[in-house]
Amino acid sequence: MSDLPNPAAEPGEQTLLSHLLELRTRLLRAVLAVLAVFIALIPFANRLYSVIAQPLLEKLPEGANMVAIDVASPFFAPIKLAFVAAVTIAIPAVLYQAWAFVAPGLYRHERKLALPLLVTATLLFYIGAAFAYFLVLPTVFSFLTGISPEGVEIMTDISRYLDFVLVVFLAFGFSFEVPVAVVILGLLRWVTVEQMREARPYVIVGAFVVAAIITPPDVISQLMLAIPMALLYEVGIIATRILLRRREAETA
């Protein structure tokens, strides 16, 4: 059966069908991008897991190792990590397909603003995940291994460790999106810059509450999430003020 729109169909039906076909094409390309990266990473799955496990292995007592409780964990844990890594690496390609689908329906000023926000959001997510890996995880594991009771041997299951690390990566990756969220709220006129400034104390308290919920129960890791969130909120306010002034100058 042909994918071409039916010439006898109504104009509205042709438009809807063409949009659906375009959406299918974009989704297929996004999935193929993820699959291509995933297939390329499969031979390196064990090596990827060794890299992810390094922050914990460096803090374990001498002679201690990680364990695999489930029989299939040595296979599925690295494969799961490879898939998550593939999705993360392919995010630019996936976002490009989403952008290519919605861009024709946007006004010129909307396209001019949306693309930088999309790129910035992607970079901030990567920066948040890198911050978690290089700074937060070593600090957290130093604390957790340091408070282990005497006589208790630390043997972390590889699957549970992976789940813990992925949650931390996602938490910090999305937390670093605060400036983008602030800019969007400001440019849409849902919140003014003055209201953002007045809400600063509540945002700081909220950042510490969020940090207390999604980080391990130690003060250091909570501070390492709450303080960047508060600082990024300030960055969002500054960026919003600059963009609003630029918009006013263009419309003047």
Image (tube, rainbow, N blue to C red):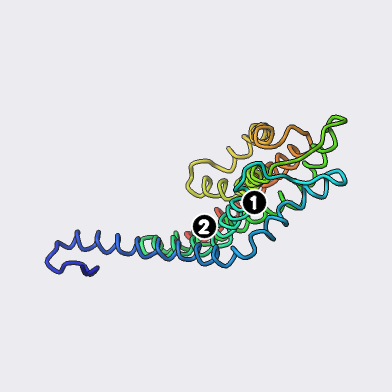
**Residue displayed at 57% across by 50% down:** 180
Question: Residue 135: which disc?
Answer: none
42 left or right of 224 in image: left
The residue under the point 74% across, 46% down is: 66
Indicate the quadrant where residue 99 lies.
bottom left
**Left or right: 82 in relation to 158:** left
Q: Indicate the amino acid at tag 2.
A: Arg
* Amino acid type, callout 1: Pro
At 78% from the left and 42% from the top, the residue drawn is 141
Q: Which mark is residue 74?
A: 1
Percent coordinates x, y for residue 17 in the rendering: 24, 61
Determine whether the residue tagged by mark 2 lies in a helix, strand or loop.
helix
Residue 14's spot in the image, x, y percent?
21, 63
Answer left or right for 40 relative to 68: left
Residue 174, relative to residue 147: is it above or below? Answer: below
Say which residue appears at 82% left-offset and 50% top-offset.
58
Image coordinates for residue 251, horizontal then vertical, percent:
47, 59
Q: What crowding class fits label 1: few (fewer than 14 Cα within 10 Å), some (14-19), or many (20 or more)? A: some
Characterize the local packing of mark 2: few (<14), some (14-19) or many (20 or more) Cα atoms within 10 angstroms. Answer: few
Decide if residue 107 is in sight here.
no
What distance separates the C-alpha of mark 1 from that of mark 2?
Answer: 54 Å
- As helix, strand or loop, the secondary structure at mark 1 comes to helix
Q: Which residue in the structure is indicated by mark 2?
A: 247
Query: Earlier along the polypeptide chain: callout 1 or callout 2?
Result: 1
Q: Residue furthest left?
A: 8
Q: How many marks?
A: 2
Q: Is residue 218 above or below residue 47?
A: above
Q: Nearer the viewer, residue 165 or 202?
A: 165
**Residue 49 screen position, x and y as percent:** 68, 55
